[in-house]
């Protein structure tokens, strides 16, 4: 008797089961994609028929929240109740605790509840049984809960934990929130239909400005960058062209992922026959190709989520110098900068951008000791309970320190001429891609055994090399680097490049 293949479990609606069987994809993935496509259509309707000029913020909050709950129930069933519990617990903390410590309590409770759900999903239920799980939306909700708590704390107390530079002080002051949101506003921010399934996270102030139809502060900063006559439509620029462009990117990313992902399985990197019979240079090339083919699925999910928000009118970020509107306020990636990154920092700055901003705001800027290590450890805890996540982010610490040392000590020697700079960029591109692939393999393999097998096959060479570089090459302490960094204006600090991220973020 043939063994029946057990598909990954799905706790959501079974309405689309026939479609799942026809296209041979897990039901939870089908539910997710269909809900996102329906959210895209709903977003256009939301912008046109529930525009702030036609209805009240109350109605927009109610509709956005109810639709978000419906999508969550459709995809995850009763597990969606965790979204309400997590949000409700932290809202109670904000109400009952003092401003002095509310941000700390919210971080511990939100992250602790998320970790509890992730641990039970991994170790109580079947290991890796879900191809799309309910803790994904909880990760974004955790970011929103903690971001808002820190913004309220900064706004009410005006305490800035690390006012080492004007840049940090300005950005925390810019994001601070002077009032406690209502329960409806809070749930709308956390669970609106545009971001309930795949985010991205955003500043609470930016979301409320979108709901209420008030001019975005960021757009004001860019209004002087109009066309030659200095005039353009300052409100409600159409997102249609940008949405079409992002949908085209989604389609291309999905086609690439479906066509080449199975051609270069990551698991082959630890296959004994492959390791024994393949020259090392070929193993390096295959490692790069296998990890390259895992990225388009993230491009698809994050770009579609960005398109949904833009279709609803959320994400406008002012104007470019030529007068064209920018719709990258909450964008989560820059694909070309990722694929052609010439440093570990450049890759991280352009991958999962909103999560990087969150980590920077709640941890890196405020941690008094070893902020780089603390930020990577927090990121590992936030991602989940799989051991591979911790191996990836622990490896990321030493790679970051080595990359910083190399950049500070070697790069200046190659800036004398364009040809030398081109040579440096070529070498650092290859080194960056290898380092990223080496670092991320455990993130894909998940388990300790396969991950350590991969590291052993490489003789821990990248680990050893990075430790030697970090120890041998001197780097100025962070407080001295910040003192030497130029002071940015408010407009610079609110750009989509990440709130002075390019100068102060750990790399």
Image (cartoon, grey):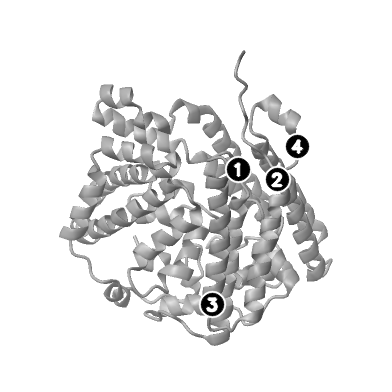
Q: Label 3, label 4: how many angstroms apart (C-alpha)?
A: 45 Å
Q: Crowding near pointer 2: few (<14 within 10 Å), some, many (20+)?
A: many
Which SS class for mark 2?
helix
Identify the mark nearer the N-term, 1 or 2: 2
Nearest the camera: 204 or 226?
A: 204
Q: Is residue 34 left or right of residue 302?
A: right
Identify the mark nearer the N-term, 4 or 2: 4
Identify the mark nearer the N-term, 2 or 3: 2
Identify the mark nearer the N-term, 3 or 4: 4
Please state, as top left, top right, bottom left or bottom right, where the N terminus lies in the image: top right
The reply to whether callout 3 and callout 4 are in contact (CB within 8 Å) is no
What residue sits right under mark 1 in the picture? 132
Q: Label 4, label 2: how many angstroms apart (C-alpha)?
A: 9 Å
User: Which residue appears at 74% of the width and 32% of the height?
Assistant: 17
The reply to whether callout 4 and callout 2 are in contact (CB within 8 Å) is no
User: Which residue appears at 67% of the width and 57% of the height?
Assistant: 82
Nearest the camera: 34 or 271?
A: 271
What residue sits right under mark 2 in the picture? 75
Identify the mark nearer the N-term, 1 or 4: 4
Q: From this viewpoint, is residue 111 visible?
A: yes
Extreme residue in the left direction: 472
Q: Label 1, label 3: how many angstroms apart (C-alpha)?
A: 35 Å
Q: Label 1, label 4: how many angstroms apart (C-alpha)?
A: 15 Å
What residue sits right under mark 3 in the picture? 174
Q: Is residue 83 left or right of residue 64?
A: left
Instruction: Indicate whether 302 appears above or below 273.
Output: below
Extreme residue in the bottom direction: 157
């Amino acid at each position: 008797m043939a063994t029946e293949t057990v598909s990954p479990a799905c706790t959501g609606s079974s309405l689309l089961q026939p479609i799942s069987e026809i296209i041979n994809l897990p039901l939870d993935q089908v539910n997710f994609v269909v809900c996102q496509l329906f959210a895209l259509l709903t977003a256009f309707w939301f912008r046109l028929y529930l525009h702030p000029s036609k209805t009240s913020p109350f109605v927009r909050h109610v509709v956005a929240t109810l639709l978000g709950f419906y999508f969550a129930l459709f995809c995850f069933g009763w597990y969606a109740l965790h979204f309400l519990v997590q949000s409700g617990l932290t809202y109670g903390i904000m109400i009952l605790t003092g401003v002095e410590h509310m941000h700390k309590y919210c971080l511990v409770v939100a992250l602790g509840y998320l970790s509890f759900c992730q641990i039970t999903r991994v170790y109580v239920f079947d290991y890796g049984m879900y191809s799309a799980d309910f803790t994904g939306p909880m990760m974004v909700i955790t970011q929103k809960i903690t971001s808002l708590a820190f913004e309220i704390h900064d706004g009410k107390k005006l305490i800035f934990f690390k006012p080492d530079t004007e840049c940090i002080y300005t950005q925390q002051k810019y994001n601070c929130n002077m009032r406690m949101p209502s329960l409806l506003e809070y749930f709308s921010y956390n669970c609106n239909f545009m971001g309930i399934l795949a985010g991205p996270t955003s500043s609470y102030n930016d979301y409320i400005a979108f709901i209420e139809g008030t001019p975005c502060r960021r757009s004001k900063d860019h209004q002087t960058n109009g066309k030659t006559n200095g005039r353009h439509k300052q409100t409600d620029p159409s997102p249609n062209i940008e949405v079409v462009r992002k949908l085209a990117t989604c389609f291309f990313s999905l086609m690439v992922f479906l066509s080449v992902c199975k051609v270069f399985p990551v698991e082959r990197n630890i296959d004994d026959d492959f390791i024994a019979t393949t020259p090392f240079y070929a193993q390096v090339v295959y490692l790069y190709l296998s990890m390259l083919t895992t990225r388009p699925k993230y491009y698809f999910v994050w770009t579609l989520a960005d398109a949904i928000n833009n279709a609803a009118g959320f994400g406008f970020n002012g104007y470019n110098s030529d007068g064209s509107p920018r719709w990258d306020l909450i964008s989560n990636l820059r694909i070309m900068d990722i694929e052609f990154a010439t440093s570990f920092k450049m890759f991280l700055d352009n991958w999962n951008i909103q999560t990087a901003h969150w980590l920077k705001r709640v941890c890196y800027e405020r941690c008094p000791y070893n902020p780089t290590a603390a930020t990577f450890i927090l990121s590992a805890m936030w991602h989940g309970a799989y051991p591979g996540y911790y191996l990836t982010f622990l490896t990321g610490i030493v790679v970051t320190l080595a990359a910083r040392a190399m950049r500070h000590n070697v790069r200046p020697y190659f800036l004398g001429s364009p040809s030398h700079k081109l040579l440096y960029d070529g070498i650092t591109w290859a080194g960056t891609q290898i380092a990223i692939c080496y670092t991320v393999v455990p993130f894909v393999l998940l388990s300790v055994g396969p991950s350590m097998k991969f590291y052993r096959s490489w003789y821990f060479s990248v680990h050893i090399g990075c430790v030697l570089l970090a120890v041998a090459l001197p780097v100025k302490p962070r407080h001295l680097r910040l003192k030497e960094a130029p002071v940015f204006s408010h407009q610079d600090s609110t750009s989509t490049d990440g709130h002075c991220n390019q100068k102060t973020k750990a790399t």
